[in-house]
């Protein structure tokens, strides 16, 4: 298992020139992370607002710090005009076009994964049924498939709790949807520890059941901080990941930064490492 960290945790390090990506990479490497995950809004309001020279600079900085850019998340956060389950064909067209921009951005940064959470931009609009919403979302994502294949980028769909959205709430729903698209090598399941707590069954059980389906993992606590900062016991979670021989990314994503991003980054990784079986 490889550990990454999400960059929006460190927006407090913003300078007059914007997000201090170089400082973030240096610090992440010093903590022991191997990868970094980027929220596009930390760089620019929209993906297409990030020029080629900036993309090249971000990739160069990560590579010089010996870090891999795993990909992007918060894909539609802080944007307007996009929605996955909209009945408006023009909104769906614009959403599909924007996803194509995100695929290009991810590839040019050297990333491989687009973590699709964005609860506000997938929640079912009034009058739209779940079946209709799935048809609309399928239309959008299928139109992005050729570009995913071209750049070898994968969309990892994240089930979220009913407190956040009414669309894609369980791992089973996402897997069923992904199989319907018939493109599992490019659109698959993402698991998030905080969100899995909403399924009301043990997280290790979910991990084992979907061991062949999920391609990316977020580690966090239901209290919105990092592993080891709340009541969620990660020992059986790490044991399940080791049992299925998960060798993908486990990326730290938190939402409550009150302990300080530096402390969250250092102690979360230290806690997870302490639970691993020595090899």
Image (cartoon, grey):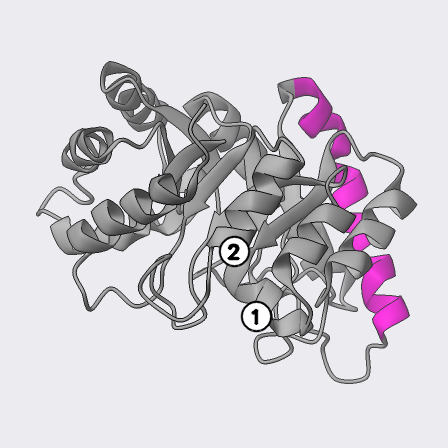
Q: Is residue 27 above or below residue 61?
A: below
Query: Which residue is most to the front?
Result: 278
Residue beneath the point at 48% across and 34% down: 71
Instruction: Please give the count of numbered marks on the rendered protein.
Output: 2
Q: Which residues are magenta?
A: 130-150
Q: Earlier in the sequence, mark 1 or mark 2?
A: 2
Residue beneath the point at 64% across and 52% down: 95
Q: Are marks 1 and 2 in contact (CB under 8 Å)?
A: yes
Q: Which residue is mark 1?
A: 120
Callout 2: few (<14), some (14-19), or many (20+) C-alpha neighbours within 10 Å?
Answer: many
Q: Which residue is mark 2?
A: 76
Asked which quadrant contains residue 38, the reply is top left
- The x, y position of residue 64, in whole percent, is 23, 15
- The x, y position of residue 55, in whole percent, is 35, 26
Marks 1/2: CA–CA distance:
9 Å
Whether residue 105 sits left or right of residue 95 in the image: it is left
Find numbered disc 2 in the image and state the secondary structure of the residue it sits on. Answer: loop
Q: Does residue 154 belong to the magenta stretch?
A: no
Query: Who is closer to the viewer here, 68 or 233?
Result: 233
Find numbered disc 1 in the image and state the secondary structure of the residue it sits on. Answer: helix
Is residue 171 visible to us here?
Answer: yes
Q: Does residue 145 belong to the magenta stretch?
A: yes
- The x, y position of residue 102, in whole percent, is 54, 38
Query: Which residue is most to the left?
Result: 16
Is residue 75 visible to us here?
Answer: no
- The x, y position of residue 4, in whole percent, is 39, 37
Q: Quadrant of the C terminus?
A: top left
Residue beneath the point at 91% across and 47% down: 180
Residue beneath the point at 36% across and 59% down: 254
């Amino acid at each position: 298992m490889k550990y990454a960290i999400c960059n929006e945790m460190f927006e407090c390090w913003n300078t007059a020139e914007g997000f201090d990506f170089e400082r973030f990479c240096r610090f992440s490497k010093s903590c022991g992370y191997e990868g970094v995950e980027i929220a596009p809004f930390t760089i620019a309001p929209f993906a297409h607002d990030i020029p080629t020279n900036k993309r090249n600079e971000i990739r160069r900085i990560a590579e010089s710090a010996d870090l891999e850019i795993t990909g992007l998340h918060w894909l539609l956060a802080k944007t307007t005009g996009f929605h996955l389950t909209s009945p408006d064909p023009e909104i769906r067209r614009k959403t599909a076009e924007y996803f194509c921009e995100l695929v290009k951005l991810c590839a040019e940064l050297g990333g491989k994964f687009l973590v699709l959470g964005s609860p506000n931009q997938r929640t079912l609009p009034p009058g739209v049924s779940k079946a209709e919403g799935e048809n609309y979302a399928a239309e959008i994502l299928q139109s992005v498939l050729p570009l995913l294949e071209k750049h070898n980028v994968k969309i990892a769909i994240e089930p979220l709790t009913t407190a956040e959205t009414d669309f894609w709430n369980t791992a089973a729903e996402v897997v069923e949807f992904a199989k319907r698209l018939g493109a599992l090598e490019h659109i698959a399941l993402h698991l998030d520890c905080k969100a899995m707590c909403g399924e009301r069954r043990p997280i290790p059980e979910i991990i084992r059941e979907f061991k062949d389906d999920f391609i990316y993992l977020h580690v966090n606590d239901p209290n919105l901080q990092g592993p080891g900062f709340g009541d969620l016991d990660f020992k059986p979670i790490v044991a399940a990941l080791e049992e299925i021989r998960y060798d993908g990314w486990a990326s730290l994503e938190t939402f409550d930064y009150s302990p300080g991003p530096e402390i969250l980054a250092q102690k979360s990784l230290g806690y997870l490492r302490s639970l691993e079986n020595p090899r």
